[in-house]
Amino acid sequence: NAGVTQTPKFRVLKTGQSMTLLCAQDMNHEYMYWYRQDPGMGLRLIHYSVGEGTTAKGEVPDGYNVSRLKKQNFLLGLESAAPSQTSVYFCASSLGLAASTDTQYFGPGTRLTVL
Amino acid sequence: AQSVTQLDSQVPVFEEAPVELRCNYSSSVSVYLFWYVQYPNQGLQLLLKYLSGSTLVKGINGFEAEFNKSQTSFHLRKPSVHISDTAEYFCAVSEWGTSYGKLTFGQGTILTVHP
């Protein structure tokens, strides 16, 4: 099993450009999450999904959109990138049987720089 | 709303010495507690979690943590660290009954083990 994979690993954008980050999991997990990690702030939840075709806002959703058309994939989009979106982005997934206690499994991250 | 505070942003220690990484939380309801580790240039992986029962929880790689409800703490300990334990450690909480597994993370503690 590959677990949780993320594409791309690195990306540099100019302000105003758009891009999509892809997350894929092969563990048949129901729940998927997108986080951003900034120095000294831990991880903050951007959006999440509790199943195929569903998405919901997390703690810091502004400037991002997501889609979960297939159970194994969770896409994070930036329509018009801003320097404040420079961060490391992590995708995670969990089984979804007992949401509060489930272990979340994380991908390796995408390092995004917006100039 | 819950919050998590990791009391030390950086902890330097010599190899084979004991270490304690401190975590305090606040919440108006019962919580579940987690410690995740992030090795350089990797995603997060679960070290251990407290769900219920014994307040002393053992995890992978010789780490353990103790839940103290009266002090709202969940400190992580290891009696003898190795160079390979150098990483960033995150404490996280989820609230009982959360529908989607919302994790609130602390700011992280960078553990550096020196030879």
Image (spheres, coloured by chain):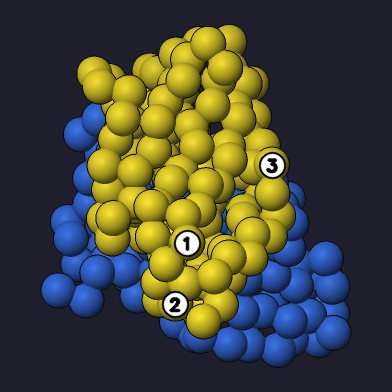
Chain colours: A blue, B yellow
Secondary-structure class at tag 3: loop
Q: Residue at x 38, y 52 (%)?
A: B79
The kind of residue on which mark 3 rests is Leu
Q: Which circle, 3 or 2, is nearer the viewer? A: 2
Secondary-structure class at tag 1: loop
Secondary-structure class at tag 2: helix
Marks 3/1: CA–CA distance: 20 Å
Q: Which mark is residue B7?
A: 3
Mark 3 vs 1, N-terminal side: 3
Give the chain of mark 3.
Answer: B
User: Can residue B14 be seen at all in this image of the molecule?
Assistant: yes
The answer to the question of whether label 3 and label 2 lie on touching residues, with beta carbons closer than 8 A, is: no
Q: Within 10 angstroms of label 1, few (less than 14), some, or many (20 or more) residues?
A: few
Marks 1/2: CA–CA distance: 11 Å
Q: Within 10 angstroms of label 2, few (less than 14), some, or many (20 or more) residues?
A: some
User: Can residue A92 be seen at all in this image of the molecule?
Assistant: no
Compared to residue A53, the image places residue B82 above or below, namely below
Quickly name the residue at label 1. Answer: B17
Task: Decide if residue B78 is on the left or right side of residue B105.
Answer: left
Q: Position of residue A94 (x, y in %)?
A: 29, 48
Give the chain of mark 1.
Answer: B
Task: Decide if residue A37 is on the left or right side of residue B36.
Answer: right
Q: Residue at x 22, y 76 (%)?
A: A2
